[in-house]
């Protein structure tokens, strides 16, 4: 380590003096002009090995200051330390793991490609920060539409159908099924692949049940709870606070039934056509008599349906007898 008194070769030196001077200059340059104090003669870009601070320094281009480069024995050591410290917080392009938050600022999106280079789409921000439409979303491979969006208010929008391989829990609120201009509908599939469709009913609200072929509505319930079905209603107990219609018949809340077989309500038909409990049976015809038969002689006499025996008549003998019969009816 050396610093020459001058980096200029004097004019017309002897051969020995020139060699001595040049050797000193070359040795100083090779040794980074090392010394505890800076060289007295400085030049832009000149190196100085500061043995006092054990730092390598370089003269700036203006030749008015020294720039600290790094440790004297390893001038890239500081840089490696900085790179190593910063590198510990960087994510590798392949097979790395993040343990903190990643913040993407500006018009930045995360894009996907398969091994063949085909695009699957990307996820990125949409809308402006703080706006009602801001949030995150997934874009299709053609980059023409949002397939899925989650707004800043938590509202999720799916472009097409949604498949859920598990339960859906609603922690408050309600599930709204609606498409502008159409009704909401639920398809409930059986193990054999057939389905029953449940959808909203027009004309003031209610529900409709649609068959598997999707060509008929076998059952409906209006907004007031009145139920109507084109099939049979079976079960041990049917409890209803509204009217029930089945196969053209109507059952009211008090148990009365309205159907074509009665020509109206069953209560009206019973009142007009059936006797009440304890009512007396009335005749529905005049009295007829059987053929005469002699007393003490074996005979078999049948009136036949719907006649019943009403009495017997004899002559004064009495030699001949006659059975008397009538029709009966309810009141």
Image: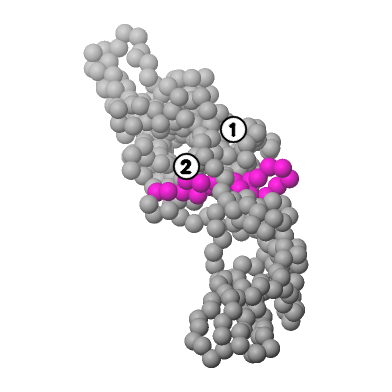
Q: Does the magenta stretch include residue 200?
A: yes
**Mark 1 and mark 2 in contact (Cβ < 8 Å)?**
no
Residue to which mark 2 is pinned: 213
- Point out residue 258 in the picture as x, y percentages from the top left corner: 69, 58
Q: Nearer the viewer, residue 142 or 131?
A: 142
Q: Which mark is residue 24?
A: none
Q: Which of 319 and 189 is in front in this view?
A: 319
Residue at the image point whose x is 57% and y is 71% from the top: 305
Region rendered in magenta: 193-212
Left or right: where 237 falls relative to 121: right
Name, please, the residue furthest toward the front: 317
Q: How crowded is mark 2: few (under 14 residues within 10 Å), some or many (20 or more)?
A: few
Asked if one can make out residue 107 in the rendered structure from this viewpoint, the answer is yes
Q: Label 1: few (<14), some or many (≥20) within 10 Å?
A: some
Q: State the image quarter where residue 77 is shown.
A: top left
Query: In the rendered image, which residue does mark 1 sit on?
Result: 126
Viewer-closest of 125 and 90: 125
In-image side of 311 versus 18 (left or right):
right
Is residue 330 at least partly visible in the picture? no
Which corner quadrant holds the N terminus? top left
Residue that sits furthest to the top in the current view? 12
* Quadrant assignment, res 22: top left
223 up-or-down from 120: above or below: below
Name the residue rendered at 55%, 72% in the picture: 304
- Residue 181 vertical position relative to residue 185 in the rendered view, above or below: above
């Amino acid at each position: 380590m050396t610093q020459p008194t001058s980096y200029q070769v004097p004019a017309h030196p002897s051969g020995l003096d020139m060699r001595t001077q040049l050797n000193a200059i070359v040795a100083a340059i090779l040794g980074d002009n090392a010394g505890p104090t800076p060289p007295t003669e400085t030049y832009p870009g000149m190196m100085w090995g500061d043995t006092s601070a054990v730092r390598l320094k370089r003269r700036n281009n203006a030749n008015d200051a020294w720039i600290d480069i790094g440790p004297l024995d390893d001038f890239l050591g500081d840089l490696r330390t900085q790179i190593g410290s910063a590198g510990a917080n960087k994510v590798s392009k392949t097979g790395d793991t993040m343990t903190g938050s990643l913040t993407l600022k500006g018009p930045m999106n995360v894009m996907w490609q398969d091994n063949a280079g085909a695009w699957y789409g990307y996820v990125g921000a949409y809308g402006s920060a703080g706006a009602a439409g801001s949030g995150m979303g997934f874009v299709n491979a053609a980059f023409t539409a949002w397939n899925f969006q989650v707004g800043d208010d938590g509202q999720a929008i799916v472009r097409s159908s949604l498949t859920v391989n598990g339960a859906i829990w609603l922690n408050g609120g309600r599930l709204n099924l609606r498409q502008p201009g159409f009704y909401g509908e639920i398809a409930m599939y059986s193990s054999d692949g057939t389905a029953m469709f449940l959808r909203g009913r027009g004309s003031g609200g209610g529900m409709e049940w649609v068959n598997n072929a999707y060509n008929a509505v076998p059952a409906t319930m209006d907004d007031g709870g009145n139920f109507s079905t084109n099939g049979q209603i079976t079960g041990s107990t049917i409890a209803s606070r509204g009217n029930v219609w089945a196969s053209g018949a109507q059952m009211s809340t008090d148990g009365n039934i309205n159907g074509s077989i009665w020509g109206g309500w069953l209560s009206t038909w019973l009142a007009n056509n059936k006797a009440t409990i304890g009512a007396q049976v009335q005749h529905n015809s005049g009295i007829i008599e059987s053929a005469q038969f002699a007393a003490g002689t074996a005979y078999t006499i049948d009136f036949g349906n719907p006649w019943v025996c009403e009495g017997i008549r004899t002559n004064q003998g009495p030699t001949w007898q006659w059975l008397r019969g009538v029709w009966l009816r309810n009141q």
